[in-house]
Image (cartoon, helix red, strand yellow):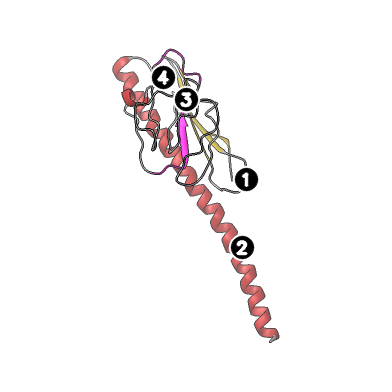
């Protein structure tokens, strides 16, 4: 009986370590989505800039329309002298006028000033706060929850010089 209890205790300890390690690995894998979405945004902005000589905040015009069930919201704030229409993700359709302070995407509604609640994962995303686009520069931001354990959001930015930064890690 003692041997059985010892085996169960060892098994429990090993599984605890394995689950913790797996959750960390899973969170790091989810961060890849933010890097991917922002690299697509960078390419779309670069292409638009090469053709028209300016950066632009309208996702449809720059050719940025991600699909699938996304864990991250991507967009700008402080949009400046650009069009205020962006891709809104599932639930609202493309081309819906967004709050001028937050053009975003990724399974969320246009929220008009508060956090969004619509998501296949039940997440409530915070507003986009760091992104910005002008005619000569842009900073795009991605915000999401990669670990699902706390109120900290994983926050990434990319700019017109292709500097990708994890502003607030959620791991």
Task: Give residue 17's mark.
Answer: 2
Q: Is residue 40 magenta?
A: no
Task: Say whether disc 2 or disc 3 marks the residue closer to the N-terminus.
Answer: 2
Task: Say whether disc 1 or disc 3 marks the residue closer to the N-terminus.
Answer: 3
Q: Residue at x 45, y 36 (%)?
A: 108
Question: Label 3 belongs to which residue?
Answer: 76
Q: Residue furthest top?
A: 81
Task: Say whether disc 4 or disc 1 marks the residue closer to the N-terminus.
Answer: 4
Q: Residue at x 52, y 53 (%)?
A: 25
Decide if residue 169 is on the left or right side of residue 93: right
Task: Give residue 84's mark.
Answer: 4
Q: Nearer the viewer, mark 2 or mark 3?
A: 3
Residue 36 place in picture, x, y as percent: 41, 39
Q: Residues within 10 Å of mark 2 (few under 14, many from 20)?
A: few
Q: Nearer the viewer, mark 2 or mark 4?
A: 4
Please state, as top left, top right, bottom left or bottom right, where the N terminus lies in the image.
bottom right
Quarter occupied by residue 134:
top left
Q: Gap in Å between the C-alphas at discs 4 and 1?
A: 32 Å
User: Which residue range is magenta in the image?
Assistant: 69-82
Task: State the residue in front, 71 or 6.
Answer: 71
Residue 102 place in picture, x, y as percent: 48, 25
Q: Residues within 10 Å of mark 1 (few under 14, many from 20)?
A: few
Task: Give residue 150's mark.
Answer: 1
Quarter occupied by residue 98:
top left
Task: Say whether disc 3 or disc 4 marks the residue closer to the N-terminus.
Answer: 3
Q: Gap in Å between the C-alphas at discs 2 and 3?
A: 39 Å
Disc 1 secondary structure class: loop
Tag 4–tag 1 contact (CB < 8 Å)? no
Tag 2–tag 3 contact (CB < 8 Å)? no
Q: Gap in Å between the C-alphas at discs 2 and 4?
A: 48 Å
Task: Say whether disc 2 or disc 4 marks the residue closer to the N-terminus.
Answer: 2
Does residue 164 show up? no
């Amino acid at each position: 009986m003692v041997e059985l209890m010892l085996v169960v205790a060892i098994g429990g300890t090993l599984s605890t370590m394995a689950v913790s390690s797996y959750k960390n690995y899973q969170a790091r894998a989810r961060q890849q989505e933010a890097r991917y979405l922002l690299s697509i945004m960078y390419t779309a902005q670069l292409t638009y800039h090469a053709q028209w000589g300016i950066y632009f905040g309208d996702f449809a015009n720059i050719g940025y329309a991600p699909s699938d069930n996304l864990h991250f919201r991507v967009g700008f704030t402080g949009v400046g002298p650009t069009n205020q229409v962006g891709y809104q993700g599932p639930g609202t359709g493309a081309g819906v006028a967004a709050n001028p302070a937050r053009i975003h995407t990724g399974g969320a509604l246009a929220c008009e000033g508060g956090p969004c609640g619509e998501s296949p994962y039940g997440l409530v995303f915070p507003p986009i706060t760091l992104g910005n686009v002008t005619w000569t520069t842009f900073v795009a931001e991605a915000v999401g929850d990669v670990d699902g354990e706390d109120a900290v959001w994983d926050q990434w930015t990319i700019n017109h010089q292709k500097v990708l930064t994890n502003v607030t890690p959620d791991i």
